[in-house]
Amino acid sequence: MIGIFDSGIGGVTVFREILKELPNYQYLYYSDSFNNPYGDKSEEELKIITNNICKYLVNNGCKIIVIACNTASAICKDYLRDNFEIPIIAIEPAIKMVYDNSYDGKTLVLATKGTINSNKFKELYQKYDNHKSIIYECRGLADLIEQDKKKEIREYLIEHLINFKDMQNVVLGCTHYPLIKDEIKEVLGEVIFYDGSKGIVKELKRKIQDINLKEEEPKIIFWDSSHKLEKEKRFYQILELEK
């Protein structure tokens, strides 16, 4: 079984890409909506939270863990890898993808406070900065997406992104943000989006081969820490699957 976790529903955008290429495995998705949002939590808080999640996933038979949350990945990846023997794969903001594919393009990097302030993000940005990029902290946006507050999301985007209409690229540095691509385009126009989900799929394929994890009867288990039934319903809607 493969474990995937996020601060809530956002990691489904990563899981959706995983299922396209690796459908014949069993998955346990942990939605930690009780502790959402992660972006404003301290490093110590996040380490305790994510350590407990990984224990849960391991105790339920997971042989690989995917951190489908940019904030948790940036802050806790090394800590978790030191604490657990199984492979732990971590998502990263897709700054390198812009560097490789659109170096001269004006780029807006959207992320949470926790991601932006992390050492890992700073290293990536310094290494792959095209000197035409703006980093913007989207405080509170992931929580609005988690709660599916469509009206408030549109109002937020108009207020915060209206001055960035000359951008060509948008790096979605939180796994919640791909859920509102259409709403972002309503404000910014036809931009090119980049996120870290493709990289996660490639790395997961490698790890599956490394540990020789065999294909099996497909199965998806969803767990939400706040025990809200609407979370599970939305999870399967985004995946376009029936429960």
Image (cartoon, rainbow, N blue to C red):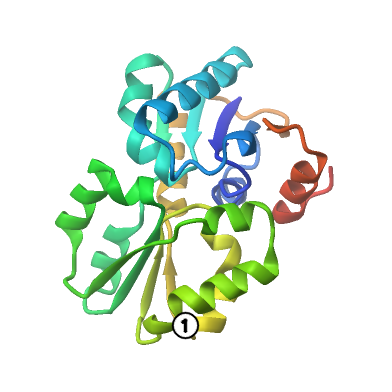
Residue at 56% from the left image edge and 82% from the top image edge: 186
Percent from the top left, x then y, of residue 111? 40, 57
- Name the quarter where the C terminus is drawn: top right
Examine the rendering and report whether any part of residue 198 can be seen: yes
Examine the rendering and report whether any part of residue 92 can be seen: no
> How many badges with numbers are in the image?
1
Percent from the top left, x then y, of residue 144? 61, 57
Percent from the top left, x then y, of residue 25? 64, 33
> In screen coordinates, is 97 left or right of 30?
left
- Mark 1 lies on residue: 188
**Where 4 sits versus 53, above or below?**
below
> In screen coordinates, is 204 left or right of 128?
right
- Name the quarter where the N terminus is drawn: top right
SS class, disc 1? helix
Percent from the top left, x then y, of residue 204? 45, 38
Residue at 24% from the left image edge and 66% from the top image edge: 99
Frontmost residue, 15 versus 191: 191
Q: Residues within 10 Å of mark 1 (few under 14, many from 20)?
A: many
Q: Find residue 170 and report its image quarter.
A: bottom left
Q: Find residue 222 and report its image quarter.
A: top right
Type of residue at label 1? Leu
**Where 77 sits versus 22, above or below?**
above
Frontmost residue, 114 versus 89: 114
Residue at 37% from the left image edge and 26% from the top image edge: 44
